[in-house]
Image (cartoon, coloured by chain):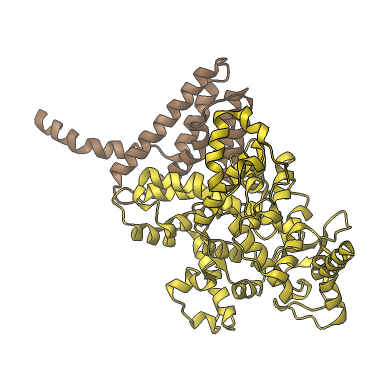
Chain colours: A brown, B yellow
Amino acid sequence: MRLRTVILTIFLLPIVSWSQIKTAPEFFIISKKMREELRTEKTKEKKILKLKDLEKQLLATQKQFEIKNPIKGDEIEKKVNFFYFTFEPLFEAKNFDSLGCKKTEHQLILEDKMGKEETEALTPDAKEAIEWLHLICK
Amino acid sequence: MLIFANLLFITSMFVGPNIALAESDELLCVNGASPLNRDLIESFNENRDPLKVAFLEYQKTTYPYSQAILPPPSNCEPNAVFKKQLGFFGELADKFSGIFDTKFDQVNPQDLALKARLEIEKAKELNRPKPFQIKKDCVKASLQRKAGREEYVCKPDAQRALRVGIAAGKSAQCYNEELVDYIHFALNQAIDCLSQDNAIDSRNILKKMNAETGFNFSVCWRGGCGMSQITSPAMKELSTDIGNGKYILEGVTKSIKKSCEPFKHIAERDLAKPPKIYKTCDWVSPGDGLARNLIYGIGYHVHMRDTQITPALNKLAPQMVQDKDVINALTSMSYGREGIKGVKGLLRRNRISKTTPPSKLRDIIESDSRYLSETQKKQKELLCLQKGHSFGRNSQCSVTTFSDEEMAGNSCVSEP
């Protein structure tokens, strides 16, 4: 009986873990929640640390997708990738001084608005990334 | 007497085309527009910006696109005193003087340093792989495609751009043979100017301009301004401190290439004071507007290729970095709605790695990118127009097939 449970657990664990791969809408909620928690935070370092935590979670999720679909990713992964790459200029920002913040904001806008009309609004993901930037830079 | 002769020459150079137009009322529009819509041609004839002046000079002399400019010989007095003052550097300069074919005594140290720099630049310029030139026939065929956006005309004395209608149907402005010659000249000058060690693939620029505006430089709308359809984020990227692409304009200002001459004053001006996207004439006028549009449009292409696409590919599949077709396709893709995020996502989602063959990635890009398939569709239209085939549903074009080489733009470029 115990052996059967162990075997079942071994076989079911990957399936359970696949079903738990976070999606883009979930990341959107996680990101918002993280920002809310930092609203009263005063130190820039702690905010950056939290941002790094979000990046780590996204990278880990991308890895999970690669294990699940080794040949080609699906539409769910596509959206997670889109979320990650929207945030990438923010993740890669070296400094958050006045010019650094302006440069990062410009990159976020540039990469989001590429090939789109002047009047077209930013995507919700880009708006979320800019909220993070403002939170760190204020 | 000499001054008078020069004045006469310069005046005839500027007035010539106007007289030709005034004498003949028969205007042949290569884009199928009404000959009555000649506001654009008139503004072109009146224009005296450096790009236009360079074109008039080119028409008279047909100098090669790729040419370095060297400064005139120094008029400085012999300066032997400096040799002693410089000591070791004086001796060093003496050794170099043989290379420069100039005696040290005949130049001052500043001249020597400048000459040394120019000699290095000249050597680099001579060894630089020259980009292929876009053929005039293809520009002409592309202009027959209807851009279908709002069209503006900028007269030299006017404060604002004049909206003259839509670049299609009855209101389309007439493009005559001379205007096609001018676009052909300006385009190849800009490509040569912005080509460094890694030459720009002219086929890619051809396909981009064909897809965006069909080489119509007078269109502007909320999707972009001028021939390259420049938008404010791209403009800021190349001209402001918050962007990462100022080196493109700086390269133009420092270049010794003759092809960069018509663009230098714009690069210098914009680096000192960034332009505004809403000043329509700055992007669509036949002189500085077209010149600015070309250096921003092609410059942005180079910037994206070198700072985004190549590093992203190098990270995942370094074996493909030398594959021009792959780099070109990804750079083009980044222009579409998918943007650079779409390119990076495509590489990751398709598990592109060190073992992926380039042909596989090329197929993936072709099937995944909507922007690229649109570009290919428009390339087919261009080829059909070049052959005189009509296009649209059930047309001669729809049953015509073109080779992969033609679709890649090979038949639209020639060796420099």
Residue A4, position as x, y percentages in the image: 11, 33
B244 relative to B225 in the view: left or right: left
| Quarter in which the N terminus of chain B is drawn | bottom right
Residue B305, position as x, y percentages in the image: 50, 50
The reply to whether residue A4 is in sight is yes
Q: Residue at x 43, y 45 (%)?
A: B312
Q: Nearer the viewer, residue B121 or B185?
A: B121
Residue B209, position as x, y percentages in the image: 61, 63
Asked where in the image residue B12 lies, by quadrant, the reply is bottom right
Asked where in the image residue B54 lies, by quadrant, the reply is bottom right
Asked where in the image residue B206 lies, by quadrant, the reply is bottom right
B341 relative to B291 in the view: left or right: left
Q: In this figure, what is the number of numbered marks?
A: 0
| Quarter in which the C terminus of chain B is drawn | bottom right
B99 relative to B344 in the view: left or right: right
Residue B4, position as x, y percentages in the image: 90, 64
Q: Residue at x 70, y 76 (%)?
A: B31
The reply to whether residue B212 is in sight is no
| As drawn, B226 above or below A100 | below
| As drawn, B369 above or below B137 | above
Q: Nearer the viewer, residue A91 or B303?
A: B303
Q: Residue at x 34, y 42 (%)?
A: A65
